[in-house]
Image: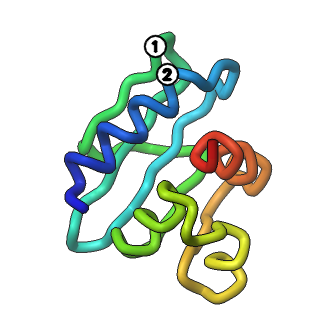
Amino acid sequence: MSIENITTQITQKMSLASGMNAKAKFDFGDEGLIFVDATQTPPVISNEDGEADVVLSCSVATFEGILNGTQDPNIAFMMGKLKVKGNMGLAMKLNSILED
């Protein structure tokens, strides 16, 4: 799955999430990143870097599994496949948004 496809899926999922009022970054290392500014309505989603309240770092393959339901994000975190920097409560909220 490409960054463009993941960006599209995140855009769809974030449009259904209300009240997040925060900034998040999904960092895929050399493969790119996705920045979500949910302090605005509708959320602004781009592939430009920015200051975020929470940063989720993982491989594209791991994130694809989270999006399609084959990878539990909690298990990915415990196994070190998913790293979280910043607001852990916000990361848990993103978890529920992405799993829907």
Residue 71: where, in percent of width, then height?
57, 71
Residue 17 in which image quadrant: top right
Tag shown at residue 15: 2
Tell me which numbered mark, 2 or 1, is placed earlier along the sequence.
Answer: 2
Label 2, label 1: how far apart the Cα atoms are:
7 Å
Residue 74 as seen in the image, left or right of residue 59: right
Residue 41: where, in percent of width, then height?
50, 11
Residue 28: where, in percent of width, then height?
34, 67
Given residues 63 and 55, the one toward you in this image is 63
Say few, some or many: other residues with alpha carbon within 10 Å of mark 1 (under 14 / 14 to 19 / 20 or more).
some
Q: Amino acid at mark 1?
A: Pro
Q: Quadrant of the N terminus?
A: bottom left
Residue 77 as seen in the image, left or right of residue 29: right
Given residues 62 and 86, the one toward you in this image is 62
Element assignment for label 1: loop
Residue 62 as seen in the image, left or right of residue 20: left
Given residues 47 and 78, the one toward you in this image is 78
Q: Amino acid at mark 2?
A: Ser
Residue 99: where, in percent of width, then height?
62, 49
Which residue is rendered at x = 58% and y = 73% of the image? Answer: 83
Tag shown at residue 42: 1
- Check if mark 2's residue and mark 1's residue have beta carbons within 8 Å: yes
